[in-house]
Structures are given as structure tokens and as C-alpha cells.
Amino acid sequence: MSKYWNILSILLLLFISLSAQSDMDKFKQANELYQEEKFQEAIELYNSLLDQDYISDDLHYNLANAYFRTNKIAKAILHYEKALKINPANEDAAHNLEYANARTIDKIETPPSLFFYRWWQALIHSFSSSSWAYFVILFGLFAIAGLGIFFFFSDSWIRKTSFYSASATLALAIICWFVADRHHRSIEEADYAIIINPTVDINSSPSEGSSRLFVLHEGSKVKLKEKNQDWFEIKLPNGNTGWMKAKDLEII
């Protein structure tokens, strides 16, 4: 029986390897189409990779660039944001996002946040979830090594130093684990969206007959608060809130 399981495992690994290779080939093909300035064809190929659950910040970044070159600014902003959500250290995506945002109509001022909150957000997004996970493993190994030295050496100075070193690295491992978990949650959370339609009415309640509070335009980033059937309650950085149709936005 184990023989058949071994064969099945080999076939499964082979299938996964061939599938990954196929995705990489398609990604390279899409990049070549972009270089040839066949932007619409590149967009279709990039999106087909997303449909196959091939996710990377480079994929979203390249797709955003292709959308930008076809003057689809809202879609470009959406995918720059998605690239940064996966990898906050993608400086090219951050730079291009700033440039794309300058092309939007709505200029909504963001009030300054508290220093501690800015520092905490910067810490969480300074590395990707996988990078924080590597730090957890690294500091965890240092802690184990320190405990090993503590138990196997008799010299009091070495034991004391190794104990405090193990305690410090264990504390760092726990902190990194907490930050990695928070970063992962921030990626999984669907709490921000980009308006993709040219002009959108923001209403006072989730119904067609409710009064219009204000108007937003494509490319604006909104915070999602609550969903009511086909409507979302949204909040702007300046504190304004209202309801809009779900079809008029795409979640980051």
C-alpha cells in the first residue's frame, strides 16, 4: 500500500511543479507583451494568472503598470495598493501609487494620526508576513541555543549571560510572532476599497431613494464599515461617511 502512496506523492509533486512552471511561463509571457507595448493583451494574461490564484506583489505591480499605460487609473491604483498590501517594502509600487493618486479628481485631506499609531503601522508594514515569520524562527533558534548553553555549562557567568540572552531573544520571537500575525490579518482583512466607476453618489442610507450626501470619483480610496445587501457604508480619511453601491468599488 505504501508503494502506491509513494507513487501518488511523486505524481502530485510533479503536477505542482509543472503547474508552477506553467504559471511562471505565463507571467514571463505577459511581461514580454508589456515590453512590446501590447498592454491590453498583457492585462488579460496577468488577470488570468490572478484567476488561477497566482498571487505576488510583482504580478499586481506589473498589472497596475499595464492599467496605468492604458489610462485606467482606478484599476492601476487598486493593484498598486494590492501589491503594497502583500509587500509593503515594494518601493516602486509606493512611488507609482503616489503618481497615480495625483491623477485622481478627489483630493481628500487626511488628518494627522497619533505618533504611536504611525509608528505601530510602520513597524507592522516594514516587512512582509513571511519576513516576520523568518525573524520568529531566527530568534527562536537563538533562544533555544541560549537555553542549551545554560543547561550544559557550569560556569556561572556563562550560565547567567546565556539565560538573559535566551530570555531576550525569546521575547523578540514572541513580539515578531505577534507582528507577523497582525500583518497577516491586515492582508486578509477586506477593510479598504477603490472606487472604480467614474462618478459615484454617496447616499445617506442604503437605498435608491435616500438623499445624496456628496459625490466621489474613480480612484478614491475608502474605508469599508458595514455591508447591507448590495450597499457598503464607507468612511473617508476626513471623517465623512455615507452609503454606496457595492458594484461601484473593488476591495483591496
Image: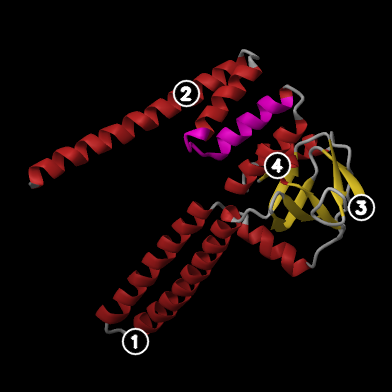
Nearer the observer, disc 1 or disc 4? 4
Sort mark 4 into few (<14), some (14-19) or many (20+) by Cα contacts within 10 Å: some
Which one is closest to the eye, mark 3 or mark 1? Answer: 3
Amino acid under disc 4? Ala
Mark pair 1, 2: CA separation: 61 Å
Q: Which residues are magenta?
A: 51-68
Q: Which residue is mark 3?
A: 211
Q: CA distance from mark 2 to mark 4?
A: 25 Å
Horizontal relation, residue 92 to residue 56: left or right: right
Image coords of residue 100 (percent x, y): 78, 35
The residue tagged with tag 3: helix, strand or loop? loop
Spatial CA distance of label 3 from label 2 is 48 Å
Dot 1, crowdedness within 10 Å: few (<14), some or many (≥20)? Answer: few
The residue at which mark 4 appears reads as 94
Of the residues shown, which amino acid type is indicated by label 2?
Lys
- Amino acid carrying mark 1 in the image: Ser
Residue at point 38% right, 28% down? 21
- Residue 202 in the magenta stretch? The answer is no
Specify the label residue 26 is tagged with: 2
Number of labels in the image equals 4
From the viewer's perspective, tell me whether residue 103 is left or right of residue 56: right
Query: Can residue 106 be seen in the rendering of this structure?
Result: yes
Q: CA distance from mark 1 to mark 4?
A: 51 Å
Who comes first in sequence, dot 3 or dot 2? 2
Rendering coords of residue 219 (x, y %): 79, 39
